[in-house]
Amino acid sequence: MSMRYTEYVRLKKGPYQSVGMFGDDIYVYEVLTGVADSPEYHQISKEEFDSFEDWVQTHGKDMKKFYEIVNRPVLCSGYLGSEYLDTSLVRDM
């Protein structure tokens, strides 16, 4: 399966980040990075997807969840050379 970052389906949106899916079963967190706001996609669990509204509200107070997720491998991004989903990094969550 070869998917580009442009095949991301945004399902919930917050400021400078969102959550959504690749395909039918890969939940991801999208965060905009760099000067050009290029997207990076980090895998999240279904539970993290479901509770997005709760933990995104705490970013200003507690960045623990944000750092936990962005320290996970980048599945793909808008950067040249990283635009295709690296399925070897997808984990059962």
Image (cartoon, rainbow, N blue to C red):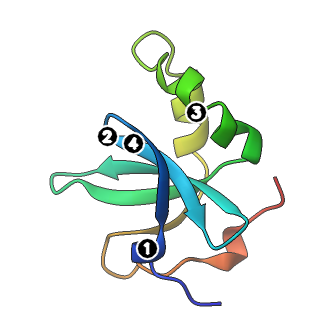
Name the element at disc 4: strand
Q: Which residue is mark 3?
A: 52
Name the element at disc 3: helix
Q: Which sits earlier in the primary sequence, circle 4 or circle 3?
A: 4
Number of other residues with Cα within 10 Å of mark 2, as a class: few under 14, some 14 to 19, many 20 or more = few
Name the element at disc 1: helix
Q: Which sits earlier in the primary sequence, circle 4 or circle 1?
A: 1
Q: Which residue occupies 53% across, 83% down?
A: 3
Q: Report the Cα–Cα distance between label 4 and label 1.
A: 15 Å
Whether residue 65 sits left or right of residue 39 in the image: it is right
Count every numbered label the image shows and give the total. 4
Q: Which sits earlier in the primary sequence, circle 3 or circle 1?
A: 1
Residue 84 at x, y percent in the picture: 48, 81
In the rendering, which numbered label is found on residue 5? Answer: 1
Q: Which residue occupies 39% across, 14% down?
A: 60
In the rendering, which numbered label is found on residue 16? Answer: 2
Residue 50 at x, y percent in the picture: 68, 37
Residue 6 at x, y percent in the picture: 39, 75
Amino acid type of the residue that numbered disc 3 sits on in the rendered structure: Phe
Q: Report the Cα–Cα distance between label 4 and label 2.
A: 4 Å
Q: Which residue is mark 4?
A: 17
Q: Which residue occupies 64% across, 42% down?
A: 49
Which residue occupies the foreground of this view, 12 or 18? 12
Q: Are marks 4 and 1 in contact (CB under 8 Å)?
A: no
Q: Which mark is in front, 3 or 2?
A: 3
Q: Are marks 3 and 2 in contact (CB under 8 Å)?
A: no
Q: Which mark is in front, 3 or 1?
A: 3
Q: Report the Cα–Cα distance between label 3 and label 1.
A: 20 Å
Q: Are marks 4 and 3 in contact (CB under 8 Å)?
A: no
